[in-house]
């Protein structure tokens, strides 16, 4: 009986302990317990700071939701009207000109924390309303850590200050503040990333766009038609027709494991239902939006002067019939906006955008597009790049017993000697020191080393020509990349195998030179119809309300530079080489493109070497063009007029 009593007592004590522990964690999580240990003198300050932090967090969530995960847009997005969709906010293209601009989850958290730190510091304002009751050291910074789960944001903030109640001697350190904000921003953001990754992997938007065009009864696509009736289209008449198809078809685009309604049409249920990873987003709804007022670029091949016709001939030797052959290729580019809504709270909305890129009926997203960072397998990459990889060998011992033995596998067996040199010189006089060499095989990139002057075991230089001799991982047709400050990165395909062991590889590198940028604008009054106006071309400096975005590219040399003018530096690096540039200039005023120029420019090498300034030109649409259609025509006319006719001018300063 005594033993039974003792067991019962231990059970009761255990239950009491479990209840107390559960109550402790409940109070802790409900943010009640923390107030018990906060000095009562500080509680008014604590409540004031908590409100500032909560308000800052709400603002951060709102801005990130409206701007595709960014709270403050990078300049290369904010300053380029074609890099975002304007909805009242600038919703960035998460993919733009072969660049993945999707924020990582880590950077997303960083943006939230930075904004909360900055805004709450301003809001608290060193507790100015309480200065009569407290002596407070100046708060120089607030350190915030944000944790997100599916239903809320948990914010831990530390204020670097101490507090003293006036007329009391006690100095108190300000306690850490923990607040919670109900939000599904994490789920909204992760669903958006899944949709974007699926599009970048499978190109479903481009495939559906081509399917719309191919299945149209109106548009010429592929096949044979027996008719003598006239068959003629214009590209300008096709554009509103295709826009209308995009608007009405993409409203039926749905995603599995989200809160979607069945379309009621077998075709859309099969073709427009996109599968994701299988995560549960049943409380989130996805809408796909295209506004016909947005930009739409279309090119149809074959066509002539904007007129599209089939290949036509008459089979008079056989039957009296006309035969029309269709084999038309469509190249289209336009933006799409994705809206993700929390069904439980429709005020919680997340936006992101992407271009749809079709070229000659095929998806065109992956033209020279590198692998997505999310696809990089870091663990496998490390195993591949390491010189010696730990492995497990199965060994047969005495009595035929099998046991595991730790061993190493040598990943790098074959050596290359790398010579990097200045392409404006020659390999004998232009060898470069301190060039970083890496090697990429499919998606794995390994850092190999740097070119250097050879030394002996006593660290004494033994040669005057820098190079790098190192072991490389085996790969068929891998890519060697050479990088050095003041030079363009250089890439070279090179197989590493037993057959290429001890090969010497020469890599030419293109030197870069800084040029001071200036910009002139042409006011061309001929677009208003006044061809005889003596002042039809007026060259002037830029106005204070104007800015330009200048892009220069050379695919062969992997050169790609963009400058927003004016800025603090107004500098641009040009290649010290006799090479052409593809130039694109956009004149911007009040977030609208009011002028364009595009052409191929090849400056003389001698001028590149002895001059240090460059003057660009762009034409502006006349202000008299108030009609949007007419304004677009004028913009096209301005761009065409500038093709090859107003090249940059290299100057002495």
Image (tube, rainbow, N blue to C red):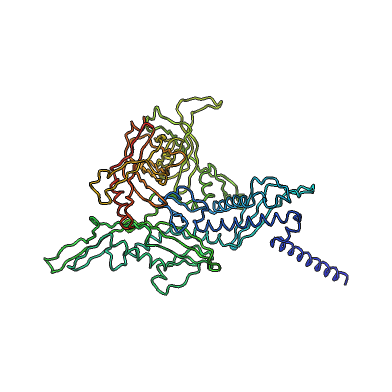
Residue 115: where, in percent of width, then height? 57, 51
- Quick check: can you spot residue 399? no
Q: Quadrant of the N terminus?
A: bottom right
Report the front residue among 618 and 301. 618
- 461 up-or-down from 643: above or below: above
Q: Quadrant of the C terminus?
A: top left
Tell me where residue 331 sits by quadrant.
bottom left
| Image coordinates for residue 274, horizontal then vertical, percent | 44, 65
Across and down, in percent, residue 520 comes to: 35, 41
Q: Which image quadrant for residue 247?
A: bottom left
**548 with respect to 104 (left or right):** left
Q: Position of residue 233 (x, y in %)?
A: 24, 62
* Quarter assignment of residue 613: top left
Residue sitting farthest toward the left: 317
Q: Write the residue at 73% across / 47% down.
A: 135
Residue 501 sits above or below residue 392 on the image: above
Instruction: Give the residue furthest to the bottom.
Output: 264
Name the residue: 49% across, 63% down.
Answer: 340
The front one of 226 and 500 is: 226
Point 73% across, 50% down: residue? 134
* In the displayed structure image, the side of residue 315 where residue 483 appears, left or right: right
- Number of numbered discs present? 0
Farthest residue in the right direction? 2
Q: Examine the rendering and report whether any part of residue 405 can be seen.
A: yes
């Amino acid at each position: 009986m005594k033993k039974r009593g003792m067991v019962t007592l231990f059970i009761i004590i255990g239950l009491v302990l479990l209840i107390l522990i559960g109550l402790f964690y409940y109070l802790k999580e409900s943010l009640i317990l923390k107030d018990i240990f906060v000095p009562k003198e500080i509680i008014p300050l604590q409540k004031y700071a908590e409100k500032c932090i909560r308000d800052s967090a709400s603002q951060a969530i709102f801005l990130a939701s409206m701007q595709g995960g960014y709270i403050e847009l990078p300049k290369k997005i904010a300053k380029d009207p074609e890099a975002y969709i304007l909805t009242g906010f600038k919703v960035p293209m998460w993919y733009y000109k072969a660049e993945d601009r999707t924020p990582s989850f880590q950077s997303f958290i960083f943006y939230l924390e930075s904004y909360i730190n900055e805004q709450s510091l301003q809001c608290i304002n060193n507790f100015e309303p309480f200065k009569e009751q407290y002596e407070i050291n100046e708060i120089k910074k607030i350190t915030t850590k944000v944790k997100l789960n599916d239903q809320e944001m948990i914010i831990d903030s530390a204020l670097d200050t101490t507090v003293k109640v006036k007329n009391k001697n006690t100095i108190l350190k300000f306690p850490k503040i923990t607040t919670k904000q109900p939000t599904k921003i994490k789920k909204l953001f992760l669903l958006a990333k899944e949709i974007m990754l699926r599009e970048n992997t499978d190109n479903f938007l481009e495939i559906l766009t081509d399917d719309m065009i191919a299945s149209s009864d109106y548009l010429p696509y592929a096949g044979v038609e027996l008719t003598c009736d006239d068959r003629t289209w214009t590209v300008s008449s096709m554009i509103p027709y295709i826009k209308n198809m995009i608007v009405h078809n993409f409203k039926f685009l749905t995603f599995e494991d989200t809160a979607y309604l069945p379309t009621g049409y077998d075709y859309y249920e099969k073709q427009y239902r996109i599968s994701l990873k299988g995560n549960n987003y049943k409380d989130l709804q996805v809408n796909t939006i295209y506004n016909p007022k947005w930009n739409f670029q279309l090119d149809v091949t074959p066509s002539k002067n904007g007129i599209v016709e089939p290949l036509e001939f008459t089979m008079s030797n056989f039957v009296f019939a006309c035969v029309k052959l269709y084999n038309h290729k469509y190249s289209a580019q336009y933006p799409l906006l994705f809206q993700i809504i929390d069904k439980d709270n429709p005020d919680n909305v997340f936006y992101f955008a992407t271009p749809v890129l079709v070229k000659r009926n095929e998806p065109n997203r992956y033209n020279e597009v590198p692998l997505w960072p999310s696809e990089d397998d870091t663990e496998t990459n490390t195993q591949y790049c390491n010189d010696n990889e730990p492995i497990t060998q199965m060994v047969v011992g005495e009595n035929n017993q099998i046991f595991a033995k730790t061993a190493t596998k040598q990943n790098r067996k074959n050596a290359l000697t790398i010579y990097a040199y200045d392409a404006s010189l020659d390999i004998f006089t232009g060898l470069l020191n301190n060039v970083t060499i890496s090697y990429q095989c499919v998606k794995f990139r390994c850092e190999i080393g740097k070119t250097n002057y050879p030394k002996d075991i006593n660290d004494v230089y033994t040669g005057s020509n820098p190079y790098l001799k190192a072991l490389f991982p085996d790969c068929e047709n891998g890519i060697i990349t050479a990088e050095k400050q003041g030079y363009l990165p250089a890439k070279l395909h090179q197989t590493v195998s037993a057959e290429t062991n001890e090969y010497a590889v020469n890599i030419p590198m293109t030197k870069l030179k800084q040029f001071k940028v200036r910009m002139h604008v042409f006011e061309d009054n001929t677009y208003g119809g006044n061809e005889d106006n003596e002042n039809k071309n007026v060259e002037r400096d830029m106005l204070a309300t104007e800015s330009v975005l200048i892009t220069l590219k050379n695919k062969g040399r992997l050169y790609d530079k963009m400058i927003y003018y004016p800025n603090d530096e107004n500098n641009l690096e040009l290649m010290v080489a006799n090479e052409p540039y593809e130039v694109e200039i956009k004149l911007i005023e009040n977030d609208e493109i009011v002028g364009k120029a595009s052409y191929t420019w090849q400056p003389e090498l001698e001028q590149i070497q002895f001059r240090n300034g460059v003057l660009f030109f762009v034409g502006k649409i006349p202000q008299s063009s108030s009609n949007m259609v007419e304004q677009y025509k004028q913009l096209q006319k301005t761009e065409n007029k500038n093709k090859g006719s107003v090249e940059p001018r290299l100057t002495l300063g």
